[in-house]
Image: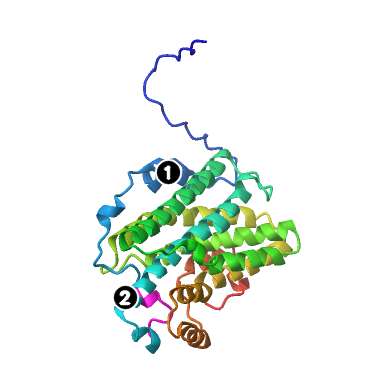
Amino acid sequence: MAEPELPASQGPVLAPALPDHDPHDVVESAVVRGLARSWGRRATVKKSEPDLDELFDPGRLDFPDELVPFHAHPGYRALDEEHRARLRGWGWIAYNKNVMDIEQYVVNPGFALITTDFFEVGPSDTVTTGVLQAMVDEQYHTLMHLNASAVIRRRRGWHMPESALPPCRTVREHRAAVAAAPDPRAQALVRLAFTTVAETSISAFLGLMTEDADLQPVNRTTVALHRRDELSHASLAAELLKMVFTELGPGDRAQLLAALAAGIEAFTGSDLGTWAAVVDAERVPGGREMLADVAAAPPRRVVQDCSAIRRLCAELGVADELPVTW
């Protein structure tokens, strides 16, 4: 049978137009509308990919020593440079896995609560479009960070698979908080809270890798491109939380605030569980003892800036009710 003829092209294929704004829709803010309409111009997924192999510089550090939790420990300083370099390589692999885990298991499931209208707030087509665009971004960020780990493994000749590492701390505590929630609605509030913390604070986490000129250009470029997207996602996540929060009763609001506090604790702390897997994989002499010494010291926040959550709660008039010690 002959193939059916396709109609002759009438010109370039255009992206579908965004839905018109409904001025009577109270859950569609100007912020969300602006983000949805600018996505094609600003999103990293819509731009050309950098050549990671061209950016690779074998003489640069793969990860800052300052972000290795035991970098000041005499046991770490006593290691030769080859061992320290491999631990920094693992640090970069773990950093990327942290980002990928959060995007896949925390952020996108939380965004899906809006696209499926779990909270029955009736998001407009434009709101749903903006959230779906962000979900596409997050999938692309996962690919970006996987590629950035792959180029280090390939160019260094190191076998450092993500499968050797546990889920990151944020994901572990997210899963525990969801499991402890008494019903599906409480679970959804936990998911929304953790998504909000991640999306409003991840730019600070990514910023840890953008300021040091001695770092690997592949790594700095990957993080800088991701961070540019996340600055817009922070605005989107804040608008979504406000959209839901205003429709909640007192009990739900209290649960959401408690979950925000748990999310901040999970997102900002050092992930010693992942580093335990690293020192075991590398058979670092005294590695577990170094981690025990770090664990016994006063807790240290890796991410220092969660001020966006505080500002968001202030806008909602509940800053004093958020159970967090800043």
On screen, residue 178 versus residue 143, left or right, reads right
Q: Which residue is mark 2?
A: 82
Q: Is residue 262 above or below residue 117?
A: below
- Measuring 68% from the left and 49% from the top, which residue is drawn there? 118
Chief SS of the magenta region: loop
Indicate whether residue 82 is drawn in magenta: no
Magenta range: 64-73
Please tell me which of labels 2 and 1 falls first in the chain: 1
Given this view, does label 2 or label 1 mark the residue nearer the observer? 2
Q: Position of residue 317 (x, y in %)?
A: 59, 65
Question: Which class describes the residues within 10 Å of circle 1: few (<14), some (14-19), or many (20+)?
Answer: some
SS assignment at label 2: helix
Q: Amino acid at mark 2?
A: Glu
The furthest residue to the right: 182
Indicate whether 41 appears above or below 274. Answer: above
Query: Was residue 70 drawn as part of the magenta stretch in this picture?
Result: yes
Q: Work out whether residue 248 or residue 71 is closer to the camera in this orientation and state it.
A: 71
- Image coordinates of residue 248 in percent, x first then y, are 69, 57
Of 11 and 50, nearer the camera is 50
Q: Amino acid at mark 1?
A: Trp
Circle 1 sits on which residue? 39
Q: CA distance from mark 2 to mark 1?
A: 43 Å
192 vs 283, left or right, is right
